[in-house]
Amino acid sequence: MKKMLVCSALFAACAAQTAHAQSSVTMYGIIDAGLTYFSNLNGHSAFVANDGSIQSNRWGLTGTEDLGGGTRAIFTLENGFNLYSGTMVQSGVLFSRQAWLGLADNRRGTLTFGKQYDFFWDNLTQFAMGQYAGQYSWHPGDFDHLAGTLHINNAVKYRSPSFYGFTVGALYAFPSQSISAGTGRVMAFGARYDNGPLHIGLAYTNTHDMGLNAPTQAGTTLFADLPAGPTLVTNMSTFGAGASYTYGISLTRILFTDTHFRVRDDNGSMPTYEINEVLQLTPTTTVLAGYWYSKLEDQRWQNATLLLDYALSKRTDIYTSATYLRASGGAAPVFLGGGAAPVFVNGTYVGTGNSSTAVRIGVRTRF
């Protein structure tokens, strides 16, 4: 009898532990801080204490509940914040990065509802040097969404299960009630292939009524007849493709994106070509070198980046980076998030200098 009672107690304890493991809520986050030197910020050199450079500061909650039969309820709530001021990135918005709920099934895929990323973030960011080096290495204005600055409200998103390494997905977002609160209608599609050392990704996003501040985002008015300020882009469509291959300590990555803008009677495309190399010299030391080239009509941008990252632990690392940006053809040398306010006359940059260098030293921790 005693043996039966002991066995029953052990069985109950194991069952309780199993049930607890099947349902969980996890808090996570990233904190990045450091100093940046700009050789040309509004025509002057400057040292800036800024945060969220290599990765944007964030905290979030993610959860899962096992519903049985291979089906799970899942959710993510994620907020962006400014470390030096303690403020939210987007005033009045609690979860400015992600806020979604959905169902995941091992055989049928994943269906989610809420504020979400498109497939450039899911399928192509992993090939960009900005993934390692941060905001000064992203393509002009992040118009191709690789840095995750496009947070899509009112979105319904489907991702298939993996089939021999292949996955596909689609997203549809209903228009926001006001453009200042988001965008118009959004449609997005994506596909990826993962097989050992080889990874390939594809993505396409089409957005109606996209609000941009192109001069401060990318150092351009887009087109010569547009004002040097916020602009409502009637239609913005972006296609991208990327690939990577790992061989020993070397990770080689290539990436192509092309963004087409339509603002009333103006039309134009911004293709960007990138190649970068990541070397894992030791388990704690990572080196990156990369280059990209972008153009829009007569405007040209070139970016070259070097990064050295040293892991102090599994959670915390220190890093230093140097990024050179050159603009020509009427564009200004503006880093994404660099804080510059260039001056334009008839769509042409009239400020001082066509290039700028950003040298960064910082520390990052994850929890």
Image (cartoon, rainbow, N blue to C red):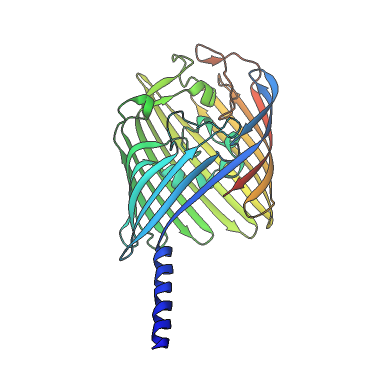
Q: Residue at x 45, y 42 (%)?
A: 78
Placement of the N terminus among the 4 image quadrants: bottom left
Left or right relative to 73: residue 330: right
Residue lying farthest top?
Answer: 345
Q: Please name whichever residue, 70 or 263, is drawn nearer the observer in this view of the structure.
A: 70
Vertical position of residue 100 compared to residue 4: above or below: above
Q: Please name whichever residue, 121 or 264, is drawn nearer the observer in this view of the structure.
A: 121
Q: Residue at x 40, y 63 (%)?
A: 22
The image position of residue 360, as x and y in percent, is 68, 35
Q: Please name whichever residue, 139 or 9, is drawn nearer the observer in this view of the structure.
A: 9
The image position of residue 255, as x and y in percent, is 52, 43
The image position of residue 222, as x and y in percent, is 47, 22
Vertical position of residue 163 compared to residue 124: above or below: below
Vertical position of residue 242 compared to residue 1: above or below: above
Q: Quadrant of residue 6?
A: bottom left
Vertical position of residue 166 compared to residue 188: above or below: below
